[in-house]
């Protein structure tokens, strides 16, 4: 029998029972050397083929995802517009609480302002103030007989007492104011007044002679003395308030007050209100000069109390009424372009006592057909650019259109209506 040859010996048990072992036997293990490189190279080639085969599929899936999730369309539409004009009357009523579209009435608000205005004015009159100096002198009688002096008896001090010196024609006298009797060897205090006005008669204490007794023995026995200076002599020109000054001040301040009270009430009204200048009534309540005619003043003050009242209305109410009025006058399938709305208003009648103002309104606005965006989206979804342009060009209410698709390779409008945006543009 031929002997079997094994390329690979079967593995021996890890533990050989003792009754099978011999001392002379030797154990060994034969292992076949396997080169792993060939196995791995084959596996790597297989994986690469699989990966390259999946890339087109992945790109297709990603493209579909981008197209379905990121694609969108923006369609700009310029509707055909028509400029329309309207006229109507509108009543502003302070008794109204809300807009009454049927009665053409909007609410009015009453405003009032009161203020006192005062200003200083210069007096234009000139007045010459003249006052004679006066004082008390003691008249002595050193003779043995009593001396009688009639009223207006002259007493004369030395000329050097006058400062500045008297000029030609000025009399250096002081006169008594009443008849007096001076006992013999006695004296009497009497009041004297300067012969002329002026400060130069305010002389210091002096001795006085009696010119009327000159040439008689009594001239040396009868004389006077003052123990205090003469006072209150005055002669000067000063400013004076005249009636014309008061009249001019009143007219000027009334005009100024009327203007300033009007500005004050306008500034008081909130900016969201419309103020009609013709609807502001001003009134002068009081005029009071703080000086009378004839007052010796260089300046005087005049006061005026003024009041202003008006009826105003909100700009928003006027605009809302105008919009609703135009909407009521156009077909139901038309819309107004609110940005093009122009409102001109002029007061017809103003009655602040009843609190009503009637306005003439001239309204102007562009109108255009109302486009059903939902129906338009449905009609355009999934369409190509050529189909969209054809459809939009045949819409009579559309004047111009522009279509934008994203991303750049997209050639059709998405079928998902949420991905379509329609924008109306009014020229």
Image: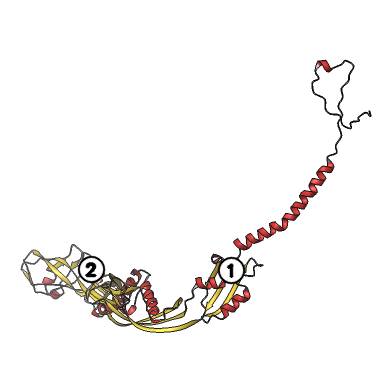
Q: Tell which of 387 and 408 is nearer to you.
A: 387
Foreground residue among 170 and 377: 377
Give me the residue at 46% from left, 80% from top: 366
Does 42 sit above or below residue 168? above
Q: Nearer the viewer, residue 298 or 190?
A: 298
Say what secondary structure mark 1 lies in.
Answer: strand
Across and down, in percent, residue 159 comes to 24, 71
Q: Position of residue 219 (x, y in %)?
A: 13, 71
Q: Quadrant of residue 96?
A: bottom left
Q: Which residue is mark 2?
A: 202
Along the polypeptide, which appears first: circle 2 or circle 1?
1
Q: Secondary structure at mark 2?
A: loop
Q: Residues within 10 Å of mark 1 (few under 14, many from 20)?
A: many
- What's the residue at 37%, 70% (across, down)? 272
Label 2 CA crowd tier, 10 Å (few <14, some 14–19, many 20+): many
Mark on residue 73?
Answer: 1
- Of all residues, the one furthest to the right in this rendering is 2
Residue ID at (8%, 63%): 186
Residue 405 x, y percent position in the rendering: 61, 69
Q: Position of residue 22 (x, y in %)?
A: 87, 16
The quarter of the picture where the N terminus appears is: top right
């Amino acid at each position: 029998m031929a002997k079997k040859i094994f390329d690979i010996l079967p593995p021996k048990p890890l533990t050989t029972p003792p009754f099978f072992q011999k001392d002379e036997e030797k154990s060994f293990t034969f292992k076949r050397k396997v080169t792993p490189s060939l196995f791995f190279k084959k596996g790597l080639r297989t994986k690469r083929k699989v990966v390259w085969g999946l890339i087109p599929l992945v790109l297709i899936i990603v493209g579909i995802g981008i197209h379905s999730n990121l694609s969108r369309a923006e369609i700009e539409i310029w509707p055909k517009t028509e400029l329309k004009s309207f006229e109507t009357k509108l009543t502003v009523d302070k008794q109204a609480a809300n807009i009454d579209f049927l009665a053409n009435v909007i609410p009015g608000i009453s405003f009032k302002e009161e203020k006192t205005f005062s200003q200083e004015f210069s007096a234009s009159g000139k007045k010459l103030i003249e006052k004679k100096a006066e004082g008390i002198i003691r008249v002595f009688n050193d003779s043995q007989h009593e001396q009688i002096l009639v009223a207006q008896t002259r007493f004369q001090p030395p000329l050097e007492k006058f400062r500045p010196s008297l000029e030609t024609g000025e009399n250096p006298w002081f006169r008594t104011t009443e008849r007096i009797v001076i006992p013999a060897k006695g004296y009497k205090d009497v009041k004297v007044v300067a012969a002329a006005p002026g400060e130069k008669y305010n002389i210091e204490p002096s001795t006085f002679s009696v010119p009327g007794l000159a040439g008689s023995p009594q001239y040396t026995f009868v004389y006077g003395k003052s123990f205090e200076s003469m006072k209150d002599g005055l002669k000067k020109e000063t400013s004076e308030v005249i009636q014309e000054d008061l009249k001019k001040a009143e007219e000027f301040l009334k005009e100024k007050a009327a203007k300033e009270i009007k500005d004050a009430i306008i500034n008081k009204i909130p900016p969201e209100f419309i103020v009609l200048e013709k609807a502001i009534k001003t009134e002068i309540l009081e005029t009071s000069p703080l000086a009378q005619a004839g007052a010796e003043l260089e300046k005087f003050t005049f006061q005026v109390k003024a009041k202003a009242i008006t009826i105003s209305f909100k700009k928003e109410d006027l605009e809302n009424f105008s919009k609703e009025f135009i909407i009521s006058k156009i077909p139901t399938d038309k819309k107004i372009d609110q940005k093009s709305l122009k409102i001109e208003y002029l007061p017809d009648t103003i009655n602040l006592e009843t609190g009503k103002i009637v306005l003439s309104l001239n309204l102007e606005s562009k109108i255009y057909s109302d486009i059903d965006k939902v129906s338009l989206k449905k009609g355009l979804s999934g369409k190509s650019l050529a189909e969209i342009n054809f459809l939009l060009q045949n819409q009579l209410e559309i004047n111009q259109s522009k279509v934008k698709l994203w991303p750049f390779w997209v050639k059709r409008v998405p079928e998902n209506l949420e991905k379509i945006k329609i924008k109306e543009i009014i020229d």
